[in-house]
Image (cartoon, rainbow, N blue to C red):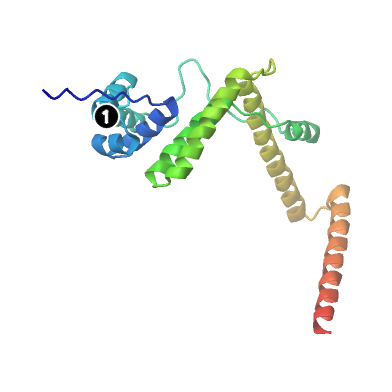
Amino acid sequence: MRPLPRTRYVTVAAETWGLIRGAYLSGLSAPTVAARFGVSVTALRKHAAREGWTKRAFAARQAAARSAPFDAVPAGEAPAGPAAGPPDEAAVLEAWRSPLQIRPDDLARRALANAAHALKAGEGLNAVRLARAATEIARLNSVLEWAGEDPAEAEARFEAGQAMMRMFLRERALNLAQDLVAGRDLPPEYEDLKIELARLAAVRAAAEAAEGAGGQG
């Protein structure tokens, strides 16, 4: 009597399951994805059901997201509005010099999402590299000691600084435009800037003329 074949169990890493999820939700069939990653169709469907990424659940979430109002504001929260007054130059410079902070968990998720897109595009090697990057970012985030400052709060402050800079530049541009329309003189710092820009233009013109003369010789 021929013995029954032994069952072969495959251990799949978490990042691989992330790629499987991306490939499955991109529209590939379960047998195709299972064959590509060396897992069984049963294991894929059980994993999808347990973690909530079946195609039916994904379609339901997409439909809910499309039907939700874009500018809905949670109850009890006032919509964000412009600042009470224009920022001054010192505040803008301070915000501009602040270092950019990142949220490692969001960065890892973004890398994994990019891996799924790479897989969908048929870029298998790039998908593996991105998945490994996501794994390494998550690992380092779990072992490194971070400062007491919350990265999310630091990132929010950085975004506020960017918004402050945009508002400051627009305000200065509007004031200059109003001065020009009214025929008023520019502020002294802009007169100095005009002189410096004219000097730089003359230097560039002289350099181009010298280069042209050298080419003709």
Q: Is residue 147 left or right of residue 112?
A: right
Is 132 in front, or is 200?
132
At 57% from the left edge and 28% from the top edge, which residue is drawn? 137
At 58% from the left edge and 28% from the top edge, which residue is drawn? 81
Is 126 in front, or is 27?
126
Quadrant in which residue 210 is drawn: bottom right
Residue type highlighted by circle 1: Ser
The x, y position of residue 92, in whole percent, is 75, 34
Quadrant where the N terminus sits is: top left
The reply to whether residue 158 is visible in this rendering is yes
- Considering only vertical position in the picture, is 209 above or below 65? below
Quadrant in which residue 156 is drawn: top right
Residue occupying the far left of the picture:
1
The x, y position of residue 93, in whole percent, is 78, 35
Q: Which residue is mark 1?
A: 40
Is 183 in front, or is 101?
101
Residue occupying the far front of the picture:
1
Q: Is residue 8 left or right of residue 119?
A: left
The reply to whether residue 69 is visible in this rendering is no
Is 45 in front, or is 36?
36
- Considering only vertical position in the picture, is 85 above or below 149? below
Which class describes the residues within 10 Å of circle 1: few (<14), some (14-19), or many (20+)?
A: some
The x, y position of residue 183, in whole percent, is 79, 56
Element assignment for label 1? loop
